[in-house]
Image: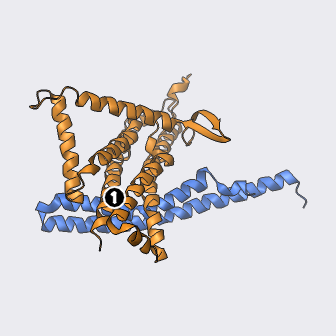
Chain colours: A blue, B orange
Amino acid sequence: MMMDMSSLEMFCKALILMGSAIGAGLAMIAGIGPGIGEGYAVGKACEAIGRQPESSGAVTRTMFIGCAVAESTGIYAFVVALIIMFINPFIGSL
Amino acid sequence: MKVPECLKGVTGVDIQGPGVAYSFDVFGITINITETVIISAVIVIALTALVLFLTHDMKKNPEKKRQVIAEWAVQTVDNLIDNTMGKGYERMAPYIAALFASSIFGSLVSLIGLRSTTADYSTTLTWALMSFVMIEYAKIKADGIGGYLKSFINPLNLISEVSTPVSMSFRHFGNVAGGMIISTLLYFALTGLSTAIGLAVPIFTIGIPAVLSLYFDLFSGFMQAFIFINLTMIYISTAKSED
């Protein structure tokens, strides 16, 4: 079967868009890691507050900073997914 | 029944970067004046006016409420720096307070329907680079230029050094931009739900998004501003106390 040039290009673009959408979805699997990590950190902070209620302010502050640092990998994955979805770099290199 | 355009709600997902208001060329480089630049300038002017109003006509014994508010703000920042960085960093207070104020106002400006300035990567990258320069300056001051260069014998240190501003800026940008995208998707979904059960006016979009906005705009905006200044303070104070 012979395809003319424009429909071939259309097909390639569709293929790239499909791959990009799947890639963006796969990238967000990284959201699992920070979820587990932050849950663990918050659980430990609750334990610490339960043991020493008077230090709850310092524990909470430290916990939030730790959570923010643990979140980094998830945010990287999110930024990658954003780039793939909204400013797709692969369509241009066709 | 004919429904006016403004009551139809969000009928398509249209997530864009900041719009360009005006652009001009300087030596062949196109410079865009974007939404972010204009809103940031408005925030700067508003903050300056607020500070001038609060500190206007101060007395030794406070008579007016605004002087009490101004003293409380200064005291809070000083205590925060004292608790986090220890003694000897009082000079950092203006920078930290300015960063916190512009970050929190830049995020909360979305509550009045404007685009958050922190949902633009340029803004957070600029702040992260400013903090990065201060962190490196603190390190050079603590170790001397020779000691500072010696720490790069291990190339892994270079990577960890470069990743500091990248992770700081991505964290702030990702949280605010993610919240913005989720709100847009929620408006789209609620409009679709209303249309699906045959309502011409999307009444589901009243009230329900406010609950999410409470988390994504208020809590997240405040939290990210707090985390950004805290990381800046921690990095600067650990530059000195190491070794």
- Residue closest to the far right: A2
Q: Is residue A91 left or right of residue B162?
A: right
Q: Position of residue B37 (x, y in %)?
A: 49, 37
Judge from the rendering whether residue B243 lies leftward or rightward of residue B32; answer left or right.
left
Q: Is residue B92 above or below residue B9?
A: below
Give the quarter of the figure containing the C terminus of chain B: bottom left
Q: Secondary structure at mark 1?
A: helix
Name the side, left or right, on which A52 lies relative to A30.
left
| Quadrant location, the N terminus of chain B | top right
On screen, B18 above or below B91?
above
Q: Quadrant of residue A67?
A: bottom left
Q: Position of residue B235 (x, y in %)?
A: 33, 62
Residue type at numbered disc 1: Leu
Q: Residue at x 31, y 69 (%)?
A: A40
Q: Which residue is identified by label 1?
A: B231
Q: Nearer the viewer, residue B185 or B178?
A: B178
Q: Is residue B130 visible?
A: yes
Q: For residue B29, what is the image quadrant? A: top right
How would you rate the neighbour count of disc 1 (Cα within 10 Å): few for under 14, some for 14-19, many for 20 or more? some
Give me the chain letter of mark 1: B
Q: Position of residue B236 (x, y in %)?
A: 32, 60
* Residue positioned 65% across, 36% down in the render: B25
